[in-house]
Amino acid sequence: MMEALLAGGAGLAVADGIRWRRKAASYEFSLNVRNNMGRRLVLFGQQCDKKLHAATFALHCTESTAGNLFRLCVRGRHTNRRSDGVQHDGTHLHRWTSEHRDEQAVAPFNPPWPPAPWEDDSQAPLSDDHLRLLFQQFCQMMHVTCDLDEIWRPKPSIDIPEFVKLPDGEEIP
């Protein structure tokens, strides 16, 4: 299966529109991925409230213990603790293997990374344009066919309280 995915021979396609869902500390979406392998695959995206400069996109198999087949961690940190000890300070790609599951990370590959223009070491929040570009780049890496103009929906704004409520009920800016 992994060889077919990497070679682009799995016929991956997405047609449904993205629907961001609010979770406790993040926004997430998942899309069913049609394929010619007869597998239940999902394309997943996430952005955590406390890491607005970062995002994650993954191709996930829901019918096996494999879980994430590929996971792109944008502006993340990772150390390959169970294998070669390589540390990734910035965007990296996890690829599932039977030996390391999805705990082994490598540098992103085709199409050429990073997309232009891109600052991998920035702490600036990702804009909707950035998220769209990164999603498009991940789809290209995974050979997923989709009409981005049809399926992309902006992530809702994160509500940041303007006031903090103290235990006694007093609100302070």
Image (cartoon, grey):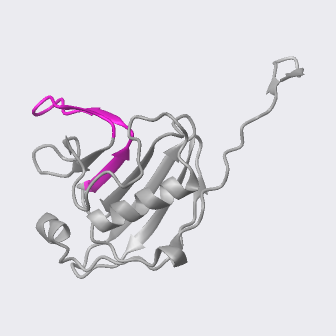
Query: Which image quarter: residue 13?
Result: bottom left
Depth check: give the residue in front, 111 or 172.
111
Q: Nearer the viewer, residue 2 or 144?
A: 144
Is residue 63 rendered to the left or right of residue 150?
left
Position of the C terminus, as image quadrant, is: top right
- Per the rendered image, the range of residues in magenta is 67-90
Question: Which residue is located at x 49 percent, y 53 percent?
Answer: 130
Number of numbered markers: 0
Q: Nearer the viewer, residue 109 or 56?
A: 109
Q: Residue at x 54, y 40 (%)?
A: 52
Task: Please report the residue visible at 21 percent of the width from the left and 78 percent of the height from the top.
Answer: 37
The location of residue 22, given as percent across then percent down, is 61, 52
Say whether residue 62 is left or right of residue 132. left
Q: Locate the N terminus by quadrant.
A: bottom left
Magenta-drawn stretch contains 77: yes
How far across and how far down the image is residue 60, in percent? 32, 60
Residue 36 sits above or below residue 126 on the image: below
Q: Position of residue 133 (x, y in %)?
A: 45, 60
81 sits to left or right of 67? left
**What residue lies at 11% left-to-right and 50% top-to-bottom?**
98
Of all residues, the one furthest to the front in this rendering is 117
Q: Is residue 1 magenta?
A: no
Which quarter of the figure has residue 91?
A: top left
